[in-house]
Amino acid sequence: PALTAALPCLCRVVLSDMGLFSSAPDEEQQKACLAALAAAFPDVSERTRKQYAASHKFKPDKASKALGESEKWRAETLPRAPGPDGSDGAAAASLLFTHRGFDHHGRPVFLYYGSSFAPKKWDADAVMLGVVHTLEAGFAAADARDPDNDGTAVIILYLDRGSKLDMDLAKRFGRTIGAHYPGRAHKALIYPGTPLATRLWAVARLFFSSEIGEKVVLVKQKVEGRKTFEEHLPEETLSLVGIDSWDKVPWGSDPDRDGAPACDADAGAVAAAGPA
């Protein structure tokens, strides 16, 4: 019940920091901002410059400052390993937030496994470092498969029994994504979309833009919930995510489908590796 009630707030916290609430200025302003960023950051990819420009409403000064700060952050943060096996960072990267293959269009798919989070035991900085390394590995795998992919991702929030919600960590996640991965959320699939959660979201989305409403999908806790996942993800990815082995899923396991392994740490590594 607490997780369900916090759902609208969580979506707002995370998605607003991803730069998804902004509207695009006129074409001339967009061109001017992109030209300024290209001149200031010639070694940064065009896709990244566009993402920063859009997330800062194509205001050159703000976009340039944000991109410069992010480049400095990347140089300082990415060389740091999440930590040795058993550390908070390594646990976050292997259990809590993992890369689980790709969607139908080659976008990386990330799984947040709610009951794997131990908020009173884990160090938030170490957790976020593990999350960042997972994001980097997933986006790099997508680029290796298709250098022309749109640079966005699908995030699955699996709030199973025993899931814990830490709003401080949620805010930290939102700030990190917004500052260093702006505009990179394509879809957020949330399961289970209980009747109460669905009603709450129906009201909450009235206060969001239509774009946000389309990005957030509550997957119903019904047999047809699997169809919703299938609309966004191929069977290979669903197997890596392990939806057929989730606790008390209404669709159960189907012997006619290829194996549906349980959600484990190794699956993320297999997914991130991409095709041989």
Image (cartoon, helix red, strand yellow):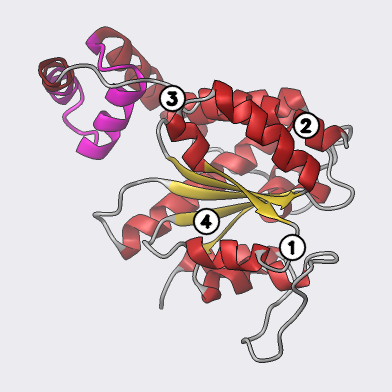
Left or right side of 19 for 61: left
Identify which amino acid the numbered label 2 is placed on.
Asp
Residue tagged 1: 222
Residues under labels 3 and 1: Cα distance? 32 Å
Residue 170 location (% of width, % of height): 68, 29
Identify which amino acid the numbered label 4 is placed on.
Val
Residues under labels 1 and 4: Cα distance? 22 Å
Q: Residue at x 13, y 21 (%)?
A: 27
Left or right side of 103 for 49: left
Task: Quarter of the image for the C terminus: give it.
Answer: bottom left
Residue 251 location (% of width, % of height): 74, 73
Residue 19: which disc?
3
Residue tagged 4: 109
Viewer-side label of 1, 4: 1
Residues under labels 4 and 3: Cα distance? 19 Å
Figure quadrant of residue 200: top right
Residue 131: which disc?
none
Identify which amino acid the numbered label 1 is placed on.
Lys
Label 3: few (<14), some (14–19) or many (≥20) C-alpha neighbours in 10 Å: many
Residues under labels 4 and 2: Cα distance? 25 Å
Count of residue discs:
4
Residue tagged 2: 123
Q: Residue at x 27, y 21 (%)?
A: 24
Residue range (magenta): 34-60
Q: Which residue extends farthest bottom?
A: 256
